[in-house]
Structure formats: structure tokens, C-alpha cells
Image: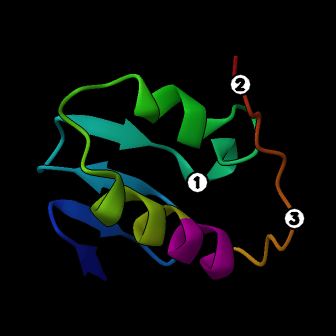
Amino acid sequence: MNFGKWKVYQNGDIDFDNGYYFIDGSRLQDEDWIYHLLEKNWVNMNDFLPAYFQALKNIDIELIQVRSFYK
């Protein structure tokens, strides 16, 4: 399934732009990917967020932790 240049696979893997950036489905809970990719100026979050949540759904992950930073 595609979301912009993000491709989501049944096993939860996420690929951006045919290999430019890759997240292994087994690592979806290892890191706060939302926060991490917010720091990248090339990421369109309107494409990444639905791709990320679809990947989580594909591997039956219903709960993640997201950090929030504000001043």
C-alpha cells in the first residue's frame, strides 16, 4: 500500500522512495519514529503518518508511545 512515496508492506516494513529510507517492521516500536522523522526536512508527515499507522496495523500493534516536547 502506498502513501505518497512511502510504501508499506504486509510485514510492517516501510520504504521511502525505493530505498532512500527504510524502517524494518520489527523495529516499529524500538524508537519514536514520529519524533525522529519530524526532525527530517524531507519528510512529508501527511504521507508518513498514515503509512506508519498502516504498518502498525499490518502487524497488529495497537499501542505505541509518542514523546511530546514543548516549551
Q: In terms of secondary structure, where does tag 3 sit?
A: loop
Mark closest to the chain's N terminus, 2 or 3: 3
Disc 2 from disc 3: Cα separation: 20 Å
Residue range in magenta is: 53-58
Q: At which x and y percent is residue 57? A: 66, 79
Q: What residue type is labelled 3?
A: Leu
Prevailing SS of the magenta stretch: helix
Q: Give the label on residue 25, or none.
A: 1
From the image, state whether disc 2 or disc 1 is nearer to you.
2
Q: Give the label on residue 63, or none.
A: 3
Q: Quadrant of the N terminus?
A: bottom left
Mark closest to the chain's N terminus, 2 or 1: 1
**In this orientation, which residue lies closer to the viewer: 41 or 20?**
41
Mark closest to the chain's N terminus, 3 or 1: 1
Q: In this view, does 7 lie to the left or right of 17?
A: right
From the image, state whether disc 2 or disc 3 is nearer to you.
2
The image shows residue 27, relative to residue 61, as above or below, that is above
Q: At which x and y percent is residue 32? A: 68, 35
**In this orientation, which residue lies closer to the viewer: 22 or 42?**
42
The image shows residue 47, relative to residue 67, as above or below, that is below
Residue drawn at x 77%, y 78% is 60
Disc 2 from disc 1: Cα separation: 26 Å
The residue at which mark 2 appears reads as 69
> Can residue 11 be seen?
no
- Label 1 neighbourhood size at 10 Å, few (<14), some (14-19), many (20+)? many
Q: Is residue 54 magenta-colored?
A: yes
Kindly indicate whether the residue at mark 1 contacts the one at mark 2 (C-beta within 8 angstroms). no
